[in-house]
Amino acid sequence: MEKGIILCVDDERVILNGLQGQLGRDFGADYAIELAESGEEAIDLINELLAAGNDIPVVISDQLMPGIKGHELLKRIHEITPATYTVLLTGYSDLEAVTEAVNHANLYRYITKPWQGNDLILTVKEAIKSFYQDQKLDNQNKLLDRHNKELEVLVQERTKQLQEEKEKADRAVQLKHKFMANMSHEIRTPMNAIVGMTRLVLSKEPKPEQLRYLNAIRMSADNLLVIINDILDFSKIEAGKVTFEKIDFNVREVLQGISDMLYTKMEEKGLKLLIDIDPAMPQMIKGDPTKLNQVLINLAGNAIKFTEKGHIEIKTVLQKTDSRQLTISFDVKDTGIGIAPEYINTVFDSFTQAGSDITRKFGGTGLGLSISRQLTNLMGGDIFIHSELGKGSTFSAVMVFDTSEVQADEKKSEKPDQTLMEQLKTLKILLVEDNEFNRMVAEDTMNDLLPGIEIHMAVNGKDAIDRLKTEVFDIVLMDIQMPVMDGLTATRIIRTTLPGRSSKVKIIAMTANVMQEDVKEYYAIGMDSHVSKPFKPTELLQKMSEVMKDVIPVGRETAQIVTPLIATQLSSVIDLKFIRQFTGGDADKIKKYTAMFLDNAPKLLAQLEDGMNTRDNKVIKIAAHSLKPQLTYMGVKEEASQIALIEKLSDDKVNVDILLPLIANLKLVCSMAFKELNKDV
């Protein structure tokens, strides 16, 4: 390695020789002492030394030199080699130069002439030490920067790898979701026809031998739906897509509903269902009644499946309560076959049952208990088993709920009341469904439930849009997956492009896709509600009544329109009594107001015509509102013009088609009024 350089710069040779001698004695063994007699020479020498790879720890320069002054030289040296430490030799009178060097040349020290030997040596020694400490630190920083860059590259590569893996996982989840949705649709669509038609035939008082076959079909279809629902529920739980409600509900009503749902199965097997509710149980609690119902139906259904004689008991025990929460144990006990000890720890595993012989004999997916336990865990609890082979089992689902401040009598009934049922019978429905059997099931079911309801058919989304352009409907029952145009695309077009009430028609999705993501999308694009296929008649009625609250049905709008008075049957429509009173009988004023009416009324009629042609309710309403007082001034009675009724019915909720006879009558009345007034004028 080349020796480090100590450079001395002075225009006096004597001083340079003195510096060389003194510094050589102390540093000559390790450093070369280089000399320069001017600033220019020093700069050239520095460039050569640096080019040769030499370190220059210290430069010592005189201040007063011809050409480049000392502080200017040190400033330029600092620009060339910022790491070099600089020392200025100067007299006391050169403090201004020292200040300049400190500010602009990063001056390390200055030494006054004549200098003390020890002062010079100590200054140079400290400068050299600082130079190499800086160099070492700089090398460490460079090494650290290199390591950081290498680490950044590794992190970027790993991040990219993780991102690719995440994208693969997301694609897999999307593919799985799509598969589950398609599977649900493909199975539920024919199941809707099977379940619906079976239900309809059962309501027609079939023969005893037919009843046996129909019940077998119904039970098989119900079992298949349980399997489909289990698979979908498992998929949602696995993907972390399950959400929980926090609503007030009555525990006793939930248990009664479970009893009603299980009644038929219990009767078929000759079993008894016992329900024991803890007397300390409050009437209302807060949580998710649907998820609770699902857990208990799974547990009780499982108990029925494995019990041939005896009873099933659902017992509730209030284990713990405070001002905010309640811990409740729902014990489902049966007198069935029981579970062998070696299988107790595996019955909650997915797709697992207590032995392959159990699966062969009793069927099922092995998902019901797994789903129940996972739901219970998500509700802050767990399921525990006590079982004895040959004697029965007890499944205890312990869950945490919030306390409720709502009293039982404050809870409103969710069943459609008789008034709403009567209203539903007046509805005009558009059923959009490509499957012929599903159309048949829906139409027959609604005709049975709501005699007199008006049902029209469309076989795809495009067909539905074409119908809505020319007709008004109260509710559209919209299938989702259809050829030509699907239900989602049709809904978007209805909401964004159709005029008037057609764009605001109530849309209920009737779909075999019951995944939560799908349902969210239905609401996001503007659907008002949804029912899953195969649909339950009571659920469909409930959803129809919910969306029609505070909405006037089409049939009732029409009923509000009294048959217009035939204008041609009137001998006269004008009565100037009001205008004479208003003007005090002033003939000029009467003539003025009459002329204004004859000028403005035709323009307002033209606006009404434009509104009707463009199906713009707002334009119709404004024109009718402006024309109404003018007709009043001319003495045209409401019974003749019905202008107030036109204004009232031109609300956004009304289809303009119902205004056609009223507008036609108004035009005749106005035509008669114009003739009468022109004659008088």
Image: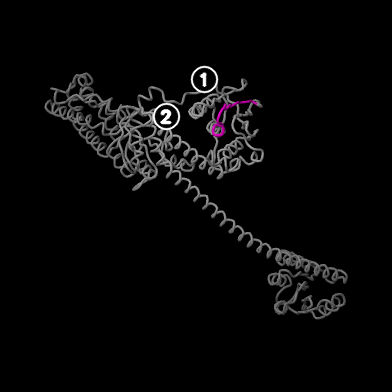
Q: Which residues are magenta?
A: 302-318
Callout 2: SS: helix
Indicate the quadrant containing the N terminus: top left, top right, bottom left or bottom right: bottom right
In the image, 176 versus 283, the foreground residue is: 176
- Where residue 585 appears, x then y in whole percent? 19, 19
Please tell me whether residue 303 belongs to the stretch shown in magenta.
yes
In the image, 334 versus 123, the foreground residue is: 334
Q: Which amino acid type is marked by label 2?
A: Thr
Task: Decide if residue 9 is on the left or right side of residue 534.
Answer: right
The residue labelled by disc 1 is: 409
Q: Which amino acid type is marked by label 1?
A: Asp
Task: Decide if residue 58 is on the left or right side of residue 152.
Answer: right
In the image, 2 versus 187, the foreground residue is: 187
Callout 1: SS: helix
Question: How many tags in the picture?
Answer: 2
Q: Earlier in the sequence, mark 2 or mark 1?
A: 1
Q: What residue is at 66 percent from the left and 38 percent from the top?
A: 341
Say which quarter of the image contains residue 668: top left
Res 465 label: none
Q: Within 10 Å of the Cα at label 1, are there few (<14), some (14-19), or many (20+) other Cα atoms?
A: few
Task: Decide if residue 460 is on the left or right side of residue 325.
Answer: left
Say which quarter of the image contains residue 102: bottom right
The residue labelled by disc 2 is: 538
> Does the CB distance between marks 2 and 1 fall below 8 Å?
no
In the image, 496 versus 220, the foreground residue is: 220
Residue placed furthest toward the left: 679
Please tell me whether residue 663 belongs to the stretch shown in magenta.
no
Q: Within 10 Å of the Cα at label 2, are there few (<14), some (14-19), or many (20+) other Cα atoms?
A: few
